[in-house]
Image: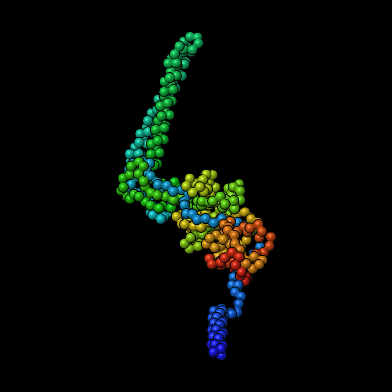
């Protein structure tokens, strides 16, 4: 009986040991299965960025602005007297140029000629009356002196002084009437008030015009003026007004449509701000625009380039270096990206000129020429210098 009991105990102990062993092996296998697969750690390569090496330098500023080439004078020529147009000059056509004083149209003027002759007759009669009155005055004076009376007459009428003054006034009035009649006769010939380009002829042969009727639209041909509105920063890039107003400061004028160029000059500067834009305008001029080669026609939309003052400590960068957010990206000494916000002081044919931060004014810097929106501040990069 004892032998049977010990066998049972032995068998139970063996089962327990076997069960524990199976559980331990199973846990070890599960832990091994859940262990992460070891991977080889790889370093991320820094991307290449195209940069140019720049350092602060001195440059002459340039102000660029747009405007329209407007004539010096633009008038609606009107008739100063009434009448029917009986003659028109062959040069009185749209698009033709005429010299100052040329007769553009002639009004029927017989009435004005008659008025002149009538005024001359009245003037002649007034002069005769004046001569007669002068003689009568001399005779009255002689009679007073021969009368033996002492002193002056009690009345000026005795010596006919009022009559003489009236006769003189009649002559002056007749002279003024003759001058007015001659002016009306001259105004019956409609003339160009200056060297002009005829923009629009508003009358024809046989037209009847009243005083003040529009006859034509004329542009002067002596010069064109271009008004360009400048901001306060742009004014700071220009020399003092005393130098600009001398009329010799050079300006390059170029057509927006075909890039044709002309050499103009600064004519004057306005001394007030525009109520809406809060900007002040500079007036640029070009003499004899229609005689230039090529001609600069009034109404042409142009781009004006004005040379300014010398500015120190600027970077000259391609326009592509300025991001859409108005930032300049550069690579610092640790080959990481950095940036700063700026506004170009001026531009010039594919380049911008900016003032760098204070900590970058002493050394050269590698500036990105094509910054991307995906770039991050502090990002590791590999600068590759290129020629802009």
Total labels: the figure holds 0
Q: Is residue 274 above or below residue 311?
A: above
Task: Report the front residue among 210 and 380.
Answer: 380
What colouring style does the render use? Answer: rainbow
Q: Is residue 382 above or below residue 322?
A: below
Residue at horizontal 47%, vertical 52%?
Answer: 70
Q: Quadrant of the C terminus?
A: bottom right
Task: Report the front residue among 265 and 1.
Answer: 1
Residue 361 figure quarter: bottom right
Q: Residue farthest to the top?
A: 149
Task: Locate residue 157 relative to residue 261 in the image: left or right.
Answer: left
Give the image location of residue 103, x and y in percent. Answer: 40, 48
Residue at horizontal 61%, vertical 65%?
Answer: 378
Give the image location of residue 356, x and y in percent. Answer: 63, 59
Residue at horizontal 38%, vertical 44%?
Answer: 78
Task: Report the front residue among 362 and 314.
Answer: 362
Q: Quadrant of the N terminus?
A: bottom right
Give the image location of residue 347, x and y in percent. Answer: 56, 59
Q: Residue farthest to the front?
A: 1
Q: Is residue 108 visible?
A: no
Q: Residue farthest to the right?
A: 362
Task: Report the front residue among 380 and 221.
Answer: 380
């Amino acid at each position: 009986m004892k032998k049977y009991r010990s066998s049972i105990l032995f068998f139970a102990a063996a089962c327990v040991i076997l069960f524990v062993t199976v559980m331990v092996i199973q846990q070890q296998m599960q832990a091994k299965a859940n262990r992460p697969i070891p991977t080889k750690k790889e370093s991320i390569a820094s991307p290449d960025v195209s940069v140019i090496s720049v350092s602060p330098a001195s440059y002459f500023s340039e102000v660029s602005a747009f405007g329209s080439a407007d004539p010096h004078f633009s008038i609606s020529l009107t008739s100063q007297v009434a009448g029917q147009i009986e003659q028109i000059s062959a040069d009185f056509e749209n698009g033709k140029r005429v010299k100052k004083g040329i007769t553009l149209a002639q009004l029927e003027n017989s009435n004005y000629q008659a008025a002149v002759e009538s005024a001359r007759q009245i003037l002649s009669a007034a002069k005769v009356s004046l001569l007669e009155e002068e003689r009568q005055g001399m005779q009255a004076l002689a009679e007073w002196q021969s009368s033996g009376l002492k002193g002056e007459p009690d009345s000026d009428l005795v010596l006919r002084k009022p009559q003489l003054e009236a006769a003189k006034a009649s002559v002056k009035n007749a002279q003024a009437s003759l001058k007015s009649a001659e002016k009306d006769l001259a105004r019956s010939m409609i003339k160009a008030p200056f060297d002009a380009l005829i923009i629009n002829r508003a009358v024809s042969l046989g037209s009847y015009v009243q005083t003040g009727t529009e006859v034509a639209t004329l542009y002067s041909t002596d010069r064109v003026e271009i008004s360009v509105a400048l901001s306060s920063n742009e004014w700071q890039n220009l020399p003092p007004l005393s130098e600009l107003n001398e009329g010799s400061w050079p300006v390059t004028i170029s057509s927006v449509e075909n890039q044709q160029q002309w050499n103009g000059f600064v004519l004057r500067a306005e001394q007030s701000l525009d109520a809406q834009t809060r900007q002040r305008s500079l007036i640029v001029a070009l003499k004899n625009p229609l005689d230039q080669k090529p001609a600069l026609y009034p109404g042409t939309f142009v781009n004006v380039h004005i040379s300014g003052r010398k500015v120190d400590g600027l970077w000259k960068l391609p326009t592509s270096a300025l991001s859409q957010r108005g930032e300049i990206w550069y690579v610092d000494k640790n080959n990481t990206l950095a940036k700063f916000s700026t506004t170009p002081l001026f531009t010039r044919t594919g380049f911008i000129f900016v003032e760098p931060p204070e900590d970058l004014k002493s050394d050269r810097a590698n500036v990105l020429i094509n910054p991307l929106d995906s770039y991050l501040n502090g990002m590791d990069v590999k600068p590759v210098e290129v020629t802009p």
